[in-house]
Amino acid sequence: MAQDSSLPEFWDTRYRGGVTPWDAAGVPPRLESWLQARKPGLRALVPGCGTGYEVRAFAEHGHDVVAIEFADAALEAARRELGALSERVRKADFFAFEAEPFDVIYERAFMAALPRRLWPQWAARVAELLRPGGELVGFFYFDDNPRGPPFGASSEQLAELLQKDFQLVEDRAIAPSESIPVFQGKERWQVWKRRI
Ligand SMILES: C[S@@+](CC[C@H](N)C(=O)[O-])C[C@H]1O[C@@H](n2cnc3c(N)ncnc32)[C@H](O)[C@@H]1O
């Protein structure tokens, strides 16, 4: 069994085996509230979308959403979940695909899926993919567990990764009732604005 979560095989094995403790089986309530407060028309990216429930949420709120996923079994799950909307999901590697800059990048369980050695590349890539003034929004996982995934960060570590290109403009705890066991008490909703 692949042990390196930077490889698609690692995720294929877990999706095929039905071992997906990160899967929220729906759209997190905090994202739903954020979407309700925004005007439609944003160009949004969902990296490492997995089953991709949020793709439908962005589309139904009138946003031009693109999702990226590199594991075939996750792509199959997204196709089953999204039906016709699965045309919004591309098979691609987050670190290598080409696209025009986005207004929003949505984060959930993607950064935490990457080995920590890849975090500097993740931060640089997120900055590259967002237009100046664009926003990295979503759920960030805070923990110091040596083994993962999920790989947690400290708030200092996350700031160190992002502060060159981003400013933290929103930060709130997620109530346990809005979380799932693997992230409970350890995830926060944050919005990081790309510096102009
Ligand atoms: C822990 S899962 C989270 C899935 C989804 N975001 C969710 O909240 O349920 C991480 C996902 O990221 C995908 N992934 C990891 N590295 C990737 C990469 N470099 N490019 C595209 N997808 C990637 C994996 O295949 C996996 O489906």
Image: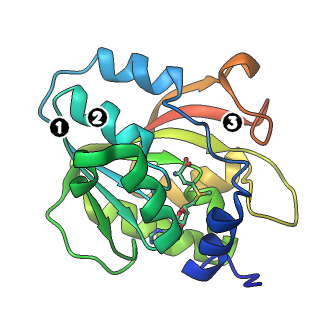
Q: Give how far across and how far down residue 40 sits, in percent.
A: 15, 26
Give the mark, 2 or 3, whose residue is nearer the N terminus.
2
Q: Give how far across and how far down residue 107 sits, in percent.
A: 48, 47
Q: Give how far across and how far down residue 124 sits, in percent.
A: 41, 69
- Mark 2 vs mark 1: in front: 2
On residue 187, the disc is 3
User: Disc 2 residue type?
Assistant: Phe
Q: CA distance from mark 2 to mark 3?
A: 21 Å
Dot 1 crowding, Cα within 10 Å, few <14, some 14–19, many 20+: some
User: Disc 1 residue type?
Assistant: Leu
Evaluate if marks 2 and 3 touch, with contact meaning CB atoms under 8 Å apart: no
- For mark 3, give the secondary structure: strand
Does 193 sit left or right of 148 as displayed?
left
Q: Give how far across and how far down residue 43 sits, in percent.
A: 18, 45
Q: Looking at the image, which residue is at 49% across and 38% down?
A: 138
* Residue under numbered circle 1: 42
Q: CA distance from mark 3 to mark 1?
A: 25 Å
Give the mark, 2 or 1, whose residue is nearer the N terminus.
1
Quarter of the picture containing the N terminus is bottom right
User: Disc 3 residue type?
Assistant: Glu
On residue 76, the disc is none
Q: Looking at the image, which residue is at 48% across and 30% down?
A: 27
- For mark 2, give the secondary structure: helix
Q: CA distance from mark 2 to mark 1?
A: 9 Å
- For mark 1, give the secondary structure: loop
* Residue under numbered circle 2: 58
Evaluate if marks 2 and 1 touch, with contact meaning CB atoms under 8 Å apart: yes
- Mark 2 vs mark 3: in front: 2
Q: Looking at the image, which residue is at 58% across and 69% down?
A: 119
**In the rendered view, would you say 92 is above or below 158?**
below
Q: Confirm if mark 3 falls within 8 A of ligand 1.
A: no
